[in-house]
Image (cartoon, rainbow, N blue to C red):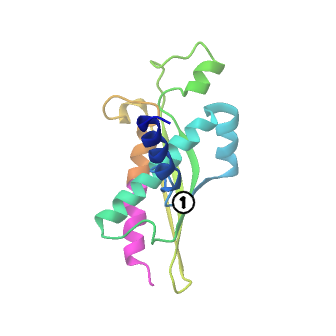
């Protein structure tokens, strides 16, 4: 093949064997109830957006404390999350909704940190708006859920540092 195609094929081969940038270093699952909400209301795509947000936030907070997320044995469950704006699936299912529709939002999360000595530490966090006036700044689909995720990640990283090893 021409040189350019060979170069592209070689590059593709390198990327095929490299760990993808989106690989989850922290396993994130969903409660059965939230999984149902994703499948029946929000759209499964939204679950991946939240899963990535949780994994990235925890990795960032652990990194700030000098810990690799790959070395940490942390399992996370998104118990619940509510969007501030309709998801793509919700707008598709209910055409009367649009991105100007706004509601209170937030999330509830749970983590289990497993120490090398077998000890476990549980971390929970729940944050939801109580009214629309609680929303700070322009609300996107998962604004308040992301705020809850960032707060949760700080708690998880602090608990990981404090956990017995």
Q: Residue at x 48, y 37 (%)?
A: 105
Indicate the quadrant where residue 89 lies: top right
| Mark 1: secondary structure | strand
Observer-nearest residue: 93 or 72?
A: 72
Residue 117 is situated, as x and y percent measured from the top left of the image, at: 52, 87
Q: Is residue 2 magenta?
A: no
Q: Is residue 133 left or right of residue 118?
A: left
Quadrant in which residue 81 is drawn: top right
- 119 lies left or right of 153: right
Q: Position of residue 59 (x, y in %)?
A: 40, 59
Q: Give residue 18's position: percent from left, percent from top.
A: 48, 56
Specify whether residue 26 is in view. Answer: yes
- Above or below, comparing residue 14 to residue 119 in the picture: above
Task: Name the residue: 42% across, 44% down.
Answer: 146
Residue at 62%, 19% in the rendered image: 92
Span highlighted in magenta in the image: 151-165
Q: Position of residue 118 (x, y in %)?
A: 56, 84
Which SS type dominates the magenta stretch? helix
Mark 1 packing: few (<14 Cα in 10 Å), some, or many (20+)?
A: many
Residue where numbered disc 1 is placed: 110
Is 119 located above or below residue 138 in the figure? below
């Amino acid at each position: 093949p021409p040189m350019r195609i060979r170069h592209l094929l070689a590059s593709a081969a390198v990327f095929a064997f490299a760990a993808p940038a989106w690989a989850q270093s922290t396993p994130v699952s969903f409660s059965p109830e939230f999984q149902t909400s994703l499948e029946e209301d929000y759209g499964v795509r939204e679950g991946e957006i939240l899963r990535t947000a949780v994994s990235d936030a925890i990795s960032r907070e652990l990194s700030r404390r000098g810990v690799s997320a790959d070395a940490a044995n942390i399992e996370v469950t998104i118990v619940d999350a509510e969007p501030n704006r309709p998801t793509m699936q919700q707008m598709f299912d209910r055409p009367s909704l649009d991105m100007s529709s706004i509601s209170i939002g937030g999330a509830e999360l749970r983590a289990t940190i497993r120490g090398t000595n077998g000890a476990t530490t549980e971390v929970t966090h729940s944050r939801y708006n109580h009214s629309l006036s609680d929303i700070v700044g322009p609300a996107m689909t998962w604004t308040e859920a992301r705020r809850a995720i960032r707060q949760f990640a700080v708690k998880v990283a602090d608990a990981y540092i404090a956990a017995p090893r």
